Amino acid sequence: KQEVTQIPAALSVPEGENLVLNCSFTDSAIYNLQWFRQDPGKGLTSLLLIQSSQREQTSGRLNASLDKSSGRSTLYIAASQPGDSATYLCAVRPRGDSSYKLIFGSGTRLLVRP
Amino acid sequence: DTGVSQDPRHKITKRGQNVTFRCDPISEHNRLYWYRQTLGQGPEFLTYFQNEAQLEKSRLLSDRFSAERPKGSFSTLEIQRTEQGDSAMYLCASIEPGGGEQYFGPGTRLTVT
């Protein structure tokens, strides 16, 4: 059974700092991995999607990497800003699951202090 | 705005009442998903549709829950005889034919008092 873990559960950093959020999954048989952002009481906004054949994806100040063999992904946020404060969730789509459903971690709550 | 809409955004109900939520996916997306998210946790899969067919239901979906997608467009999720443990955020997502990125709606926050 696929399980997704995110560490740390919460993180507080001063503005301007570069930071790394971690995601690990127990079964390397994945089709893709998606990083989401969730603001309090809101839905999920997709940030980056990495296919299993890819090693990384970049969007602006965000860079996500994938090491499928070790079951790990990282989300790197450069030059953090207070507006980056949110919960960041990673989710995997298991390979061979015809439903395409996502398995989520519990998220990392990020606070960027001005 | 991802293009997936949900209604209502918030619902407060008393225990034992029935509630119904609606999700409108992106129009060309043939797959629609329902997830439930409790405080401090990630979303958990409940059920999904391909067009109008409900193809999988999680064990989380007790017999008090029913979902429909009658014409392969919008979907409804009904909870009968609500319990306090049903309090959660109910999220809807859709995906284009062939798979790829899932797009989530803003969610419906249910509070059962």
Image (cartoon, rainbow, N blue to C red):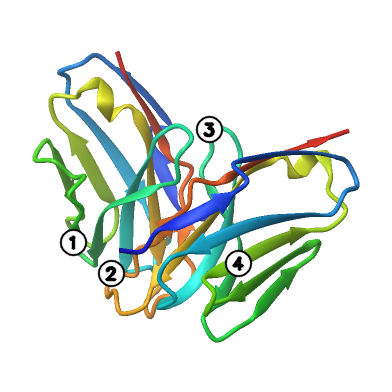
Q: Earlier in the sequence, mark 2 or mark 3?
A: 3
Q: Residue at x 24, y 68 (%)?
A: B50
Q: Amino acid at mark 2?
A: Ser
Q: Is residue A32 above or below residue A20?
A: below
What label does residue A41 carry, if any?
3
Residues at marks 4 and 2, CA–CA distance in whole angstroms: 23 Å
Picture disc at residue A73: 4
Question: Dot 1: what SS?
Answer: strand
Same chain, marks 1 and 3?
A: no
Residue bearing mark 1 = B56
Q: Chain of mark 1?
A: B
Q: Decide if residue A8 is on the left or right side of residue B11.
A: right
Q: Which disc, if any, is residue B113? A: none
Q: Which residue is mark 2?
A: A99
> Which residue is depicted at the point 49% across and 46% down?
A106
- The residue most toward the bottom is A53
Q: Distance between the Cα atoms at labels 4 and 1?
A: 28 Å
Q: Amino acid at mark 3?
A: Gly
Quarter of the image for residue A22 reads: bottom right
Q: Chain of mark 3?
A: A
* Of A50 and B14, the residue lying toward us: A50
Q: Are marks 1 and 2 in contact (CB under 8 Å)?
A: yes
Q: Answer yes or no: do the residues labelled 4 and 2 have beta carbons within 8 Å? A: no
| Discs 2 and 3 carry the same chain letter | yes
* Marks 3 & 4 on one chain: yes
Q: CA distance from mark 2 to mark 3?
A: 27 Å
Q: Find out whether the residues at labels 4 and 1 contact each other: C-beta distance under 8 Å.
A: no
